[in-house]
């Protein structure tokens, strides 16, 4: 008697989400408040599949507070580029503790890659894209491996390149949420005041957008809020985010 054909084990390599999924989410949550949207997703279909990625910058407390109000067990990912302001690291620890998050995951650059590609620590001064790839993009890529979706704090008003930012997009097969995409500065300020959230200590010193210390400068009155990032370079994003316009920013 012939043996039954052995069933082959198949590995599913399809992306967790597609552009069609992002479009469906965009339509589904049109007109739904940010908090209600987060509550439905974080306690429903994305529970256990999503992380919040935060730079713990000047506006980060708003989104983190919203996430914490729904589920403090959502992992929060922070990439320590080892070029951060000391004030950012202190703010990160204080804010995460205050909001009650149970899992703060800190990822750092691979020391082997640093030794090979940025041994003197000065790559930021002549190749900021390469520096971001080594110190931020690659660590975040590792951090996101267990997740099918992640939350970003980007907002449309922050720069011209973010003006058409959707609430949902696809990034490397993952669903990326931009819950504050349509929020403006006044709305953020009102939320800070209503919930008495602590401010990043550098904000009062003229830093409305805060990244790594070597590539962050003060912003002058009337300038774009992100004008102090990579000043003097034709660079608008760190490489984590897909550009809104082709050719605007390399995608790693």
Image (cartoon, rainbow, N blue to C red):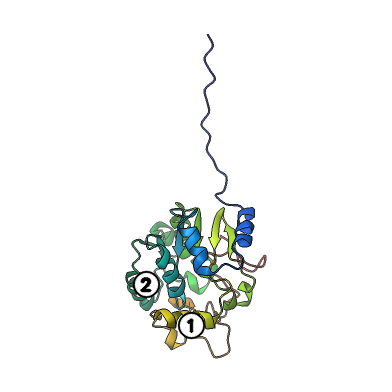
Residue 80 seen in the current view: no
How many badges with numbers are in the image?
Answer: 2
Q: Position of residue 151 (x, y in %)?
A: 49, 63
What residue would you read off at disc 1?
190
Q: Residue furthest right?
A: 246
Label 1: how many Cα within 10 Å (few below 14, some 14–19, many 20+): few
Disc 1 is placed on an element classified as: helix
Q: Residue furthest bottom?
A: 221
Say which residue appears at 64% left-offset and 69% top-offset. 248
Nearer to us in this view, 237 or 222: 222
| Residue 25: quarter of image | bottom right
- 30 lies left or right of 202: right
Residue 206 seen in the current view: yes
Q: Position of residue 33 (x, y in %)?
A: 54, 69
Q: Position of residue 1 (x, y in %)?
A: 52, 8
Nearer to us in this view, 227 or 201: 201
Say which residue appears at 57% left-offset and 45% top-offset. 14
Quadrant the C terminus occupies? bottom right
Q: CA distance from mark 2 to mark 1?
A: 21 Å
What residue would you read off at disc 2?
92
Disc 2 is placed on an element classified as: helix
| Sequence-first disc among 2 and 1 | 2
| Residue 73: quarter of image | bottom left
Nearer to us in this view, 102 or 245: 102
Disc 2 vs disc 1: which is toward the camera? 1
Q: Position of residue 3 (x, y in %)?
A: 52, 14
């Amino acid at each position: 008697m012939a043996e039954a054909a052995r069933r082959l084990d198949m590995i599913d390599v399809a992306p967790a989400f597609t552009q069609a999924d992002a479009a469906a989410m965009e339509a589904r949550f049109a007109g739904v408040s940010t908090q209600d949207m987060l509550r439905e997703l974080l306690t429903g279909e994305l529970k256990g599949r999503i992380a919040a990625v935060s730079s713990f910058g000047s506006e980060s407390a708003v989104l983190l507070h919203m996430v914490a109000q729904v589920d403090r067990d959502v992992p929060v990912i922070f990439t320590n580029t080892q070029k951060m302001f000391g004030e950012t690291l202190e703010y990160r620890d204080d804010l995460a503790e205050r909001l009650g998050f149970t899992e703060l995951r800190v990822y750092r650059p691979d020391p082997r890659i640093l030794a090979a590609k940025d041994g003197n620590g000065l790559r930021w001064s002549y190749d900021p894209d390469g520096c971001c790839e080594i110190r931020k993009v690659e660590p975040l890529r590792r951090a996101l491996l267990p997740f099918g979706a992640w939350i970003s704090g980007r907002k449309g008003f922050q720069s011209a390149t973010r003006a058409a930012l959707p609430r949902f997009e696809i990034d490397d097969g993952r669903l990326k949420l931009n819950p504050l995409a349509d929020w403006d500065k006044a709305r953020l300020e009102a939320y800070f005041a209503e919930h008495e959230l602590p401010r990043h200590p550098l904000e009062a010193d003229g830093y409305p957008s805060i990244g790594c210390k070597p590539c962050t400068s003060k912003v002058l009155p009337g300038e774009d809020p992100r004008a102090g990032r990579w000043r003097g370079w034709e660079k608008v994003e760190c490489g984590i985010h897909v550009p809104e316009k082709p050719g605007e920013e390399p995608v790693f």
